[in-house]
């Protein structure tokens, strides 16, 4: 009996933060109806086991804002002819410092923003 209670607590402890983050991301997308161009100003990697964080500077109504997001990756197959022999992970966005990226933001709260093209389920790291 107690084992079921412990398992339920563990499952809840895992699911609640995930659900919270998904709701937070959905709210950003719901209210971020305006877009602007931002510039990559920093890229921070803490090694293979941690996500790479990109910092993008953007301007709304002559006010500078900074956005930090983990870089999403896409799976790209390595092939010889048509035969896949492996794969590598590549960022879905241009992460070079100075590159331009599209930022979606909430006009009522411009610091509530996200990178439009940074879509994916695999975090870098």
Image (cartoon, helix red, strand yellow):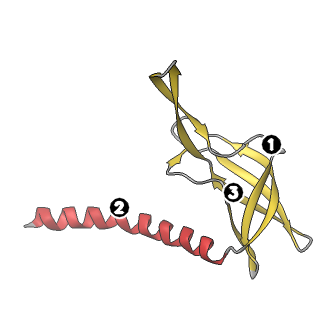
Pointer 3 or 1: first along the chain: 3
Mark 2 or 1, closer to the camera: 1
Q: Residue at x 11, y 66 (%)?
A: 2
Question: How far apart are labels 2 and 1 at the CA level?
Answer: 35 Å
Residue 30 appears in the picture as rendered: yes
**What percent of the width, then of the height, locates residue 118?**
63, 53
Tag on residue 97?
A: 1
Q: Residue at x 60, y 76 (%)?
A: 30
| Label 3 sits on residue | 68
Question: How far apart are labels 3 and 1 at the CA level?
Answer: 14 Å
Tag on residue 120?
A: none
Residue 125 appears in the picture as rendered: no
Pointer 2 or 1: first along the chain: 2
The C terminus sits in image quarter? top right
Q: Is residue 109 above or below residue 46?
A: below
Q: Residue at x 56, y 43 (%)?
A: 73
Q: Are marks 3 and 1 in contact (CB under 8 Å)?
A: no
Is residue 37 or residue 124 the one in the foreground? Answer: 37
Q: Secondary structure at mark 2?
A: helix
């Amino acid at each position: 009996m107690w084992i079921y209670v412990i398992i339920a607590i563990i499952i809840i402890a895992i699911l609640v933060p995930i659900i919270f983050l998904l709701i937070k991301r959905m709210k950003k997308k719901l209210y971020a109806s305006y877009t602007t161009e931002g510039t990559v100003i920093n890229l921070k990697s803490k090694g293979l086991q941690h996500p790479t964080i990109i910092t993008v500077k953007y301007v709304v109504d002559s006010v500078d804002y900074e956005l930090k997001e983990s870089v999403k990756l896409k799976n790209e197959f390595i092939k010889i002819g048509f035969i896949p022999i492996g794969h590598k992970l590549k960022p879905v966005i241009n992460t070079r410092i100075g590159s331009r990226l599209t930022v979606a933001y909430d006009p009522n709260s411009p610091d509530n923003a996200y990178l439009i093209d940074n879509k994916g389920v695999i975090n870098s790291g």
